[in-house]
Image: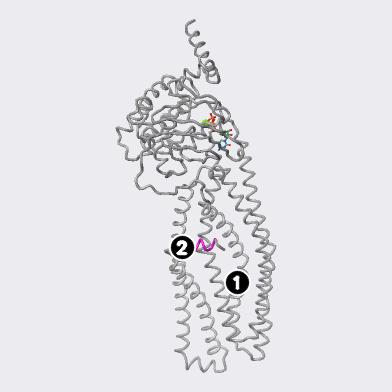
Amino acid sequence: MFELKWLWQNLEGNRARYILALCLSVVGSSLTIVNPYLSQRIVDTFIAGDNAVQNLTDKRGLLIALCLGMIGFSLLRTGLAYFTTMQYERSSQNMLYRIRIYLYNKIQGQDREYYDHNRTGDLMTKMTGDLDMVRHSMAWIFKTIIESFTIFAAAVIYFFSIDTGLTLWMLTLSPLIFVVAYIFAKHVRPMYVDLRERLSQLNTTTQENISGNRVVKAFAREAYEIEKFTEKNVNYSTANKKAALVWLDYFPYLETFAQAFNVILMLAGGLYLMEGRITFGEFAAFSSLVWAVSNPMRNIGIIINDIQRFFASLTKIVEIYYARPAIVNEHQATTKRRYEGRLTFEHVTFKYDSATVLDDVSFTVEPGETIAIMGSTGAGKTTLINLIPRFYDVSGGRVLVDGIDVRELELDELRGNIGMATQDVLLFSDTIDGNIAYGDPELPEEEVVAYAGLAAAHDFIVKMPEGYDTVVGERGVGLSGGQKQRIALARALAVHRSILILDDTTSAVDLETEEHIQNSLRGLDYPCTKLIIAQRVSTTAEADRILILDNGRLIEEGTHAELLAKRGYYYDVFMLQNEGIGRQVMAHGQK
Ligand code: CTP
Ligand code: MG
């Protein structure tokens, strides 16, 4: 039920409108009995009553008034229904808008771990289908419930005012209907939860396939992917059919009960009519309102279905709401400081789930130093640098920036002091200019060009059809891996941060370009500590110090010369890479 409370909270600003809509529903539905009442009067006075013929001539005015009244009330009800629906739509759309923004912010604020464990397709389902289901329920299902209930109640009250006995006869069926409906509801609920899960799986598969289409094509696995999709599609469709079939099991009972109202009315009502207990007009009123009693009963199945779906969806949405990131921004910095850029790792260990990825890593980097990090793939290099901007928190030990534990720093300030080019480059569907200036939208055009130049990207950018205004990314022009890396590098340089982290950023560029980038990094016009993950000795050789990670442990640390002298891992890598170059040089020489 707390989910409903949550929904109510989010209706803020529209509560009055929503309550008005609910009240109007009640009023509008109560008016349903007005016309049967008027026709009862007409029948009893002008058609079947004792003085019908006499009245027809004497009270013609009343007859006309009653007829006009019927027309008037019909119009009134239609107008009211229109107005009411509008209030429902407005308040629920406003609520949806609000929740959507809220959830979006919530998702944006989640930490990396959340994204490691939540599928994009599932989040998309929550943000679209589930949200819409909730809105639909607020605007339509609750309306149907209120209206069915009011019509039922109004009809029953009206019936009681005519004849208690006959009304009781008619109500004998109600408990049975409720029992059937209750059993149905219990049966069908898990099915809707299941249905919702399958839809989410279907969406996830679709989303992964679309975004991963290049890989699918590269491996010519289209048939396999289509099969995988078909399987999810069949699952979803089967679950849908199953839920629909359950409904079919109950439908005949509910329908029979609903029809039985008519039979009871004919039998009991006919009897009472003959006994003179009720008049023709009253019988006609019963008869014309019998639907008001049977329809809600009939609708109960549909309503239950929808309510189950509503709760299945609502639960999923509320999950987003209550997901609390472990890494939160606790204090708001009023003025953001610029750090000096001293980094310290103190006995840092880190586990993703249970496997230890970093094991007792300690080192210090002084402001302005350039540190290269090297190590075999999977050694934990990316993990290590992810701890600095707190994408993840350490499992043991401490990471300090300027001598302060990162967990005690203001998160925006901390991240605002780090420029990063991540290993898997992601550019937005935007112009090259927009991508480079992503971290600082105010960045003047000349600076964009300047940083693109430093990142060795300027030359290829100006050759593109629209230069810096070329749109890249999903719908834009394709870029090579090395070109993307260079744009990402320019983006990281352009924010002038005191700590610059480059994760394998020059892995896809040629040696000449790399040298250009090396020079740029040395000559940056702002003070900055640099952490550079690299595999090439040509990159690491220039660094002030080199750290070698192996299997989560720091196994070597020192300058190029020191590490070579040590004849360890670094020396081996150096020999391996230079042997290659040596061979190439020899091959050239022989030509
Ligand atoms: N890992 C994990 N969960 C993640 C990321 C990584 O369990 N979300 C594990 C990987 O399986 C790997 C280890 O953490 O064994 C280290 O990963 P990473 O730090 O990314 O390794 P790198 O040294 O950066 O490897 P590479 O050179 O290939 O980038
Ligand atoms: Mg990595």
Residue pictured at 54% horizontal, 94% vertical:
51
Where in the figure is residue 551, as x and y percent of width and height?
58, 29
Which amino acid does the dot numbered 1 rest on?
Answer: Asn
- Bounds of the magenta span? 3-10
Query: Disc 2 and disc 1: Cα gap in Å?
Result: 30 Å
Query: Reading the chain from its start, which is encountered first: label 2 or label 1?
Result: 2
- The residue closer to the viewer here, 413 or 420, is 413
Is 190 above or below relative to 46?
Answer: above
Q: Which of the 4 image quarters holds residue 181?
A: bottom right
Q: Is residue 49 above or below residue 476?
A: below
Q: Quadrant of the N terminus?
A: bottom right
Mark 2 lies on a secondary structure that is: loop
Query: In the image, is residue 564 above or below residue 48?
Result: above
Instruction: Please say if the residues under marks 2 and 1 sit with CB atoms less than 8 Å apart.
Output: no
* Element assignment for label 1: helix
**Type of amino acid under label 2:** Leu
Is 428 displayed left or right of 569 in the figure? Answer: left
Q: Which of the 4 image quadrants contains residue 499?
A: top left
Q: Residue at x 40, y 31 (%)?
A: 487
Q: Which residue is mark 2?
A: 11
Considering only vertical position in the picture, is 500 above or below 187?
A: above
Residue extending farthest to the top is 590
> Front-most of 52 and 237?
237
Ligand 1 found in image quarter: top right
User: Mark 1 highlights which residue?
Assistant: 295
Q: Quadrant of residue 228?
A: top right
Left/right placement of residue 533 relative to residue 413 reads right
Residue 63 place in picture, x, y as percent: 48, 87
